[in-house]
Amino acid sequence: MCIPPSSETRTDYTDKSRYACPLAENWGDINLYRPFKHAELDGYFGKKGKKGHDGWHDFYKAHPRAAGIWTFSRPGYNRDHNEAVLYVAHSCGWLCGTGHLYFLARESSASKWIVKNRLFLWIS
């Protein structure tokens, strides 16, 4: 049986998801990722309607080792910070990508977050 996040966690997620927040440059192994500013991504994909423009071609030409683009929402928490909801999307081409909503929980004795449920939202 899937237990949903509390209404408090869902409300915090909804409130925070309205605002973008850049990923810190020192998050995780910097050899595995590189944060992008929205302006840089707009340079690849913001030219809709320009004849002959292919944003993904330009992106992979500039970043040949990239495995696409990952997008993370700001997490929503409950008051005790032992529940969280997070949206994660991976885009790798015009018809290549997925989006998931994660429900995470931290048990009182554990220091790690555990995925309690994952909702598969879309695929392209």
Image: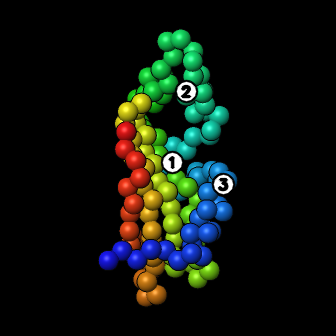
**Residue 70, percent from left and from top:** 47, 46
**Residue 45, percent from left and from top:** 55, 28
The disc label shown at residue 71, or none? 1
The residue at 45%/27% (across/down) is 56
Q: Please, what secondary structure does the residue beneath circle 1 have?
A: strand
- In-image side of 60 versus 42 (left or right): left
Which mark is first along the chain, 1 or 2? 2
For the residues labelled 1 and 3, the Cα–Cα distance comes to 14 Å
Say what amino acid the circle numbered 1 marks: Thr
Instruction: Give the vertical position of 15 relative to 89 (above or below).
Output: below
Instruction: Give the vertical position of 14 relative to 4 (above or below).
Output: above
The disc label shown at residue 54, or none? none
Q: Please, what secondary structure does the residue beneath circle 2 have?
A: helix
The residue at 37%/44% (across/down) is 123
The residue at 59%/22% (across/down) is 47
For the residues labelled 2 and 3, the Cα–Cα distance comes to 23 Å
Instruction: Give the vertical position of 71 relative to 28 (above or below).
Output: above
Which mark is first along the chain, 3 or 1? 3
Q: Which one is nearer the viewer's eye here, 35 or 45?
A: 45
Display colour scheme:
rainbow
Q: Which residue bears the numbered disc 2?
A: 44
Asked if disc 2 and disc 3 are in contact, CB closer than 8 Å, the reply is: no
Q: Is residue 33 visible?
A: no
Say what amino acid the circle numbered 3 marks: Arg
The disc label shown at residue 18, or none? 3
